[in-house]
Image (tube, rainbow, N blue to C red):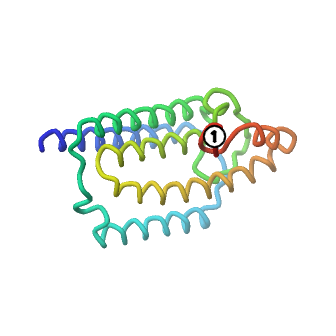
């Protein structure tokens, strides 16, 4: 049982460190414009669904994993996912922005992790979430489905903006690169 709590602690510290890094890095991005009313409504729906699931006990007694192989595989997926998201965030540099934002001086980044997928930050966070579910409890896949719905919607809105900003180059990039999963989706 002590090993299970150690694995939970590793995930808690890993996610906390990742989000603290993310918030600090946000201070160094280019200025942009975001449709806050729309984004806030979408986030509110996701938060309400998450709270409902928590209140209904969806994550309580979810069969906490004690298999060391599953924990190891989950930690590997978690590390690969966060590593991919951080690589993408560092590669896009100051062009990064909150979901569904329009940059004042946009640049189209198609190299590094953006050669593999158009939205590698979302891909990495989702992979890290799947790793969390594998290692801790399959119930966490519910949270990943909610995140995926939000990310696919955000990516779709962002792609609309990018097509407007880069009408000559973005459609070609979009046709040649998958959205979230290399070679698949």
Query: In the figure, residue 169 lies in which quadrant?
Result: top right
Q: Position of residue 20 (x, y in %)?
A: 39, 41
Q: Position of residue 38 (x, y in %)?
A: 61, 66
Position of 131 with respect to 96 (left or right) is left
Q: Measuring 75% from the left and 42% from the top, which residue is drawn there?
A: 174
Q: Is residue 40 above or below residue 128?
A: below
Q: Measuring 69% from the left and 45% from the top, which residue is drawn there?
A: 103
Q: Farthest residue toward the right? A: 168
Q: Position of residue 18 (x, y in %)?
A: 40, 39
Q: Measuring 63% from the left and 27% from the top, which residue is drawn there?
A: 112
Q: Toward the viewer: 116 or 83?
A: 116
Residue where numbered disc 1 is placed:
30
Q: Farthest residue toward the left? A: 2
Query: In the figure, residue 121 lies in which quadrant?
Result: top right
Local crowd size for mark 1, using a 10 Å CA cut-off: few (<14), some (14–19), many (≥20): some
Position of 58 with respect to 144 (left or right) is left
Q: Position of residue 49 (x, y in %)?
A: 43, 69
Under tag 1, what secondary structure?
A: loop
- Where the N terminus falls, by quadrant? top left
Q: Farthest residue toward the top? A: 112
Give the number of marks.
1
């Amino acid at each position: 049982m002590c090993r299970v709590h150690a694995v939970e602690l590793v995930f808690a510290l890993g996610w906390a460190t990742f989000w603290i890094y993310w918030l600090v890095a946000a201070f160094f991005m280019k200025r942009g414009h975001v449709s806050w009313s729309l984004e806030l409504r979408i986030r509110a729906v996701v938060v309400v669904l998450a709270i409902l699931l928590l209140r209904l006990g969806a994550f309580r007694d979810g069969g906490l994993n004690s298999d060391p192989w599953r924990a190891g595989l989950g930690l590997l997926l978690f590390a690969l996912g966060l590593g991919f998201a951080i690589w993408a965030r560092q590669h896009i540099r100051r062009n990064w922005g909150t979901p569904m934002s329009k940059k004042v001086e946009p640049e189209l980044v198609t190299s590094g992790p953006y050669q593999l997928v158009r939205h590698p930050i979302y891909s990495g966070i989702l992979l890290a979430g799947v790793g969390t579910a594998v290692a801790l409890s399959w119930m966490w896949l519910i949270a990943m489905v909610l995140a995926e719905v939000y990310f696919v919607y955000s990516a779709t809105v962002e792609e609309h903006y990018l097509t407007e900003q880069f009408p000559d180059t973005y459609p070609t990039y979009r046709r040649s690169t998958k959205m979230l999963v290399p070679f698949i989706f």
